[in-house]
Amino acid sequence: MRIEPDDPGGDWVAQGVYEVSPDLYRIPLPLPSDGLKAVNVYAMRDGDGLVLIDSGWAIEDAREVLEKALAALGHGIGDVHRFLITHVHRDHYTLAVRLRREFGNRISMGAAELPSLRLVADPKRPPWASMFIQLSRGGGQPLIDQLAAEAAAAAEQVDSEHTASDWEDPDDWLDPPVDVALRGRTLRAVPTPGHTRGHVVFVDPDRDAMFTGDHVLPHITPSVGFEAEIAHSPLGDYLQSLRLVRGMPDRTMLPAHGPVSPSVHARVDQLLDHHATRLDEMAAVITHGANTAYEVASRITWTRRGRRLDELDLFNRCLAVVETSAHLDLLAEQGRLRRTVTDHVRHYQA
Ligand SMILES: [Zn+2]
């Protein structure tokens, strides 16, 4: 693998080591599912070693690509003296945990991820437990049945002990906002709850850059509230975190999925617009007689391509219902809808 200049107009997923700015490199790592094509890990030279922002998913393919990429930088995985993790999702956190067992790297993550990590690390907890709760609140019984069937089939294939062991505590729980002193520079961890409760972005003031994790992504709208410890108002939190970042100086955006782009603010403005439109759209669907998150999700379209709910894969159908619930609950909080609960199912009226 050779070091090449990063080309924001190129294929961001293509394997390589891309120099974003002096001593800072973007390394896209493969993911096992084809929904999200890759996750960007950012490596910065720091002292005589490296600091990595996010780590990738604990799969053999990702580890191999990371090893080759670090070799191109003249380093091995043992030279990574710090992993700074934006949030607890598998594609960002689990490879760091696996590598630490061999190399003893230090891992830091936002403290508000602790409750979710405790839940997913519990081997007695059934997979998808929180998703089932959220789908049931959303009136998504058909999805619950399908997910239960898939989970049962997967449980027969997967060595569950192995899966649970990818979830261990980090070495440090960051309590943001907080400065993170590295060997050669200081980054600032800023709390951005919403995508998950403990999501943080890292600001690099010297490079005038922000590692946005999944908080601000260039091509897709980050999901909100897909996490083990269910947040009270994930969309409310998320919008507030967008406004927080919008109130900070504009910087280069270094996202976890997608190409680097020159302005965090430009994308935040689009995301705020998107959610305002989405809130109006969902309120209108309730006015026209839909009652639950599942019904609303079935009547609106998804992704930039305008797909119907039943055209998405199962996981994304589930995420869509969780996403819809987050919008409807925010509308209820804002007094734009009335919410009643019958047998755990949340019903909404105009
Ligand atoms: Zn991600």
Image (tube, rainbow, N blue to C red):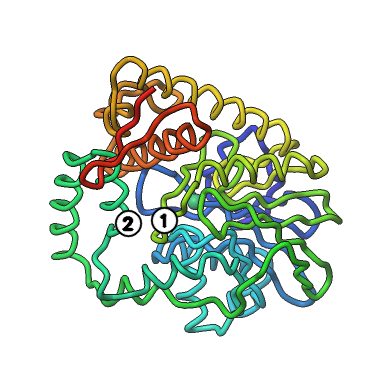
Around disc 2, counting alpha carbons within 10 Å, would you say few (fewer than 14), some (14 to 19), or many (20 or more)? Answer: some
- Which quadrant is home to the C terminus? top left
Amino acid type for the residue under numbered disc 2: Ser
Which quadrant of the structure image shows residue 94? Answer: bottom left
Residue at 34% across, 23% down = 307
Which residue in the structure is indicated by mark 1?
230
Q: Nearer the viewer, residue 52 or 222?
A: 222
Which residue in the structure is indicated by mark 2?
130
Mark earlier in primary sequence (1, 2): 2
Q: Nearer the viewer, residue 1 or 53?
A: 53
Q: Nearer the viewer, residue 293 or 45?
A: 293
- Residue 79 x/y as whole percent: 65, 78
Left or right relative to 222: residue 250: right
- Above or below residue 67? Residue 27 is above
Amino acid type for the residue under numbered disc 1: Ile
Residue at 29% across, 18% down = 289
Residue at the extreme top:
288
Residue at 50% across, 60% down = 56
- Which quadrant is home to the N terminus? bottom right
Residue at 13% across, 57% down = 153
- Above or below residue 152? Residue 81 is below
- Above or below residue 83? Residue 42 is above
| Alpha carbon distance from label 1 to label 2 | 7 Å
Left or right relative to 266: residue 108: left
Left or right relative to 38: residue 43: right
Query: Is disc 1 in contact with disc 2, using a CB cutoff of under 8 Å?
Result: yes
- Residue 225 x/y as whole percent: 45, 49
